[in-house]
């Protein structure tokens, strides 16, 4: 029953007007994101091109301009996001949660206080290691860019626009050369082979027919979300992925991650597993793949 309520919490029919407004705002936000055009020095650029420059450029002025370009989407999203925040909190309160964060945390079987304490404990445990890694990284980056060692690492020095990863610090770890001459299709097919090699069944034919896996050709007018994802559309066999795969290490790792979602979805799709339970053990479960 608790899982049923959590699944229904995103659209509680105790307040259909609120739900309708929330759905409209979510749709608008997705449309803004999907249709946003990044521009660098007045010229249209893509998310893949931004990522490539942040990984490879050694020109700090160029890197800063590219990083700032990657953040231009923020102001475009802000107004509707503020509106959406209120609607999401309203939806949560319909389900007797104080705010949307508390509702999201409930999916982990935790209260807000429990989640925050767990995160604070993790941060305290990891801090000594992180400080050592941070110090090592800033010295390596200062050497790479021929700059004095900074107290804090400038965001545009890091080879990832969100600083989720810190590529380019160890040349021996750069494996892009192994993808030279490969086609994007090889990347995603290799990812599938990884999972079938572990004993998972192959993805259904519909995955390859209905997924949007490669960059939009320059001559096409349509736009797409640049953030990779994978979806269990009908909780049965309709599994689809949205990516913009190119033959490099970044997309090699991303394709493996996204197809991990797909193969987990397939593992849940069995007659003995109720539709209600065809999800990960927690919202973050799949992200460990």
Image (cartoon, rainbow, N blue to C red):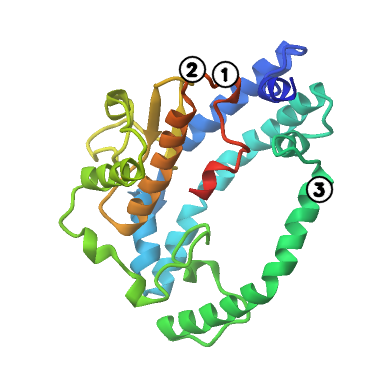
Is residue 42 at least partly visible in the picture?
no
Is residue 270 at least partly visible in the picture?
yes
Q: Which residue is mark 1?
A: 274
Q: Decide: few, some or many residues near mark 3? Use Cα within 10 Å; few <14, some 14-19, many ≥20.
A: few
Q: Which residue is mark 3?
A: 114
Q: Is residue 209 above or below residue 258?
A: above
Asked where in the image residue 110 lies, by quadrant, the reply is top right
Image coords of residue 244 (percent x, y): 33, 43
Q: Is residue 183 above or below residue 213?
A: below
Secondary structure found at label 3 = helix
Given residues 61 and 112, the one toward you in this image is 112
Q: Is residue 236 left or right of residue 83?
A: left
Q: Is residue 248 above or below residue 235?
A: below
Q: Determine the CA span between mark 2 and mark 1.
A: 7 Å
Looking at the image, do the residues carrying marks 1 and 3 touch, with CB atoms under 8 Å apart? no
Q: Is residue 180 above or below residue 271?
A: below
Q: Determine the CA span between mark 1 and mark 3.
A: 29 Å
Image coords of residue 182 (percent x, y): 18, 53
Q: Earlier in the sequence, mark 1 or mark 3?
A: 3
Q: Is residue 167 left or right of residue 7?
A: left
Q: Determine the CA span between mark 2 and mark 3.
A: 35 Å
Secondary structure found at label 1 = loop
Q: Residue at x 23, y 65 (%)?
A: 177
Image coords of residue 116 (percent x, y): 78, 51
Image coords of residue 254 (percent x, y): 39, 49
Secondary structure found at label 2 = loop
Q: Residue at x 43, y 73 (%)?
A: 60
Q: Which residue is mark 2?
A: 271
């Amino acid at each position: 029953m608790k899982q049923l309520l959590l699944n229904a919490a995103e659209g509680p029919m105790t307040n259909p007007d609120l739900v309708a407004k929330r759905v409209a705002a979510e749709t608008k936000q997705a449309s803004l994101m999907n249709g946003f055009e990044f521009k660098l020095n007045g010229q249209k650029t893509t998310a893949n091109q931004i990522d490539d420059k942040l990984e490879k450029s050694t020109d700090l002025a160029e890197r800063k301009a590219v990083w700032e370009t990657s953040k231009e989407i923020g102001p475009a999203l802000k107004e509707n996001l503020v509106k959406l925040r209120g609607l999401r909190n309203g939806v949560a309160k319909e389900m007797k949660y104080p705010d949307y964060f508390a509702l999201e945390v409930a999916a982990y079987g935790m209260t807000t206080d429990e989640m925050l304490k767990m995160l604070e404990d993790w941060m305290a445990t990891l801090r000594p290691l992180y400080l050592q890694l941070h110090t090592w990284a800033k010295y390596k980056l200062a050497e790479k860019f021929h700059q004095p060692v900074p107290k804090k690492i400038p965001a545009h020095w890091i080879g990832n626009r969100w600083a989720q990863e810190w590529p380019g610090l160890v040349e021996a770890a750069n494996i892009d050369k192994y993808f030279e001459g490969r086609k994007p299709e090889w990347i995603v097919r290799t990812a599938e082979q990884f999972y079938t090699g572990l004993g998972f069944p192959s993805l259904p034919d519909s995955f390859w027919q209905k997924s949007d896996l490669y960059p939009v050709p320059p001559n096409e007018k349509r736009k797409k979300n640049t953030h990779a994802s994978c979806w269990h559309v009908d909780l049965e066999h309709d599994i689809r992925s949205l990516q913009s795969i190119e033959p490099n290490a970044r997309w090699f790792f991303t394709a493996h991650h996204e197809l991990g979602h797909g193969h987990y979805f397939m593992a849940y799709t069995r007659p003995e597993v109720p539709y209600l339970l065809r999800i990960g053990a927690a919202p973050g479960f799949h992200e460990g793949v």
